Image (spheres, rainbow, N blue to C red):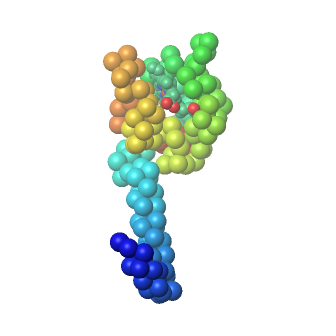
Amino acid sequence: MNLFDLQSVFEKTTPEKIMTIKSITLSLGLVSFVFTASAAAPDLGKLPPAAKKEGVSYDKDIKPIFEKSCVKCHGPEKNPKSKYRVDSLEAAIKGGSSGEAAIIPGKGEKSPLLLQVADLIDDEDKRMPPTDKRDKYPALTKDEVGLVRAWIDQGAK
Ligand code: HEC
């Protein structure tokens, strides 16, 4: 392309063309935003339904599940993984080094812990118990996930 051609390209860049380019850029941005947002949203349709049981409690119903599948890594030992402990109700709700609450009482669907034990988190490293350790620390059954869901929905008492 010689200099003369280049000059004619610049001369033809009308305000209309600039607007078209801007709106194409904007739509592309919007499309990629929508894609990113939908990839991050968990598929709540796959979440096992909350157990019908009333008065689900940490001490009676949930602690035994945590003791079987979680407490070896998230208990009183020297370095609980991700500085997160499930051996007391307060600590289990609070969360660990992520800085995010693990449980939002009353809102199972919004509680990271429930999505993590139901394998609905995209990031495989955050599925609990870790997928490569389930020979020693069993994954929660659908019924157990339903019980955890009911417990959180009922206020995580
Ligand atoms: C074999 C060890 C191991 C077991 C068993 C285990 N976890 Fe974890 N957990 C980890 C590790 C490692 C991380 C950090 C993962 C990461 O962020 O990459 C973690 C992180 C977490 C977090 C995030 C805490 C925060 O705020 O940073 C939660 C919540 C959690 N685990 C819940 C559970 C629950 C509930 C169970 C039992 C159903 C469980 N884990 C079983 C190793 C374990």
Query: Residue drawn at (38%, 79%), measured in percent from left and top?
Result: 5
- In percent of width and height, residue 121 lies at 42, 41
Query: Residue drawn at (49%, 49%), measured in percent from left and top?
Result: 109
**Residue 130 sits above or below residue 118 on the image:** above
Relative placement, left or right, of 102 versus 119 is right
Q: Nearer the viewer, residue 24 or 79?
A: 24
**Residue 37 sits above or below residue 25 on the image:** above
Relative placement, left or right, of 90 versus 30 is right
Q: Nearer the viewer, residue 87 or 121?
A: 121
Q: Does residue 9 appear in the picture of this structure?
A: no
Q: Which residue appears farthest toward the top when viewing the image?
A: 78
Q: Nearer the viewer, residue 101 or 147?
A: 101
Q: Which image quarter is the C terminus in? A: top right
- In percent of width and height, residue 87 lies at 59, 22
Q: Does residue 24 appear in the picture of this structure?
A: yes
Relative placement, left or right, of 157 versus 109 is right
Q: Nearer the viewer, residue 128 or 155?
A: 128
- In percent of width and height, residue 137 lies at 40, 20
Image quadrant assignment for residue 98: top right
Q: Which image quarter is the N terminus in? A: bottom left
Query: Residue drawn at (40%, 52%), measured in percent from left and top?
Result: 39
- In percent of width and height, residue 126 lies at 46, 34
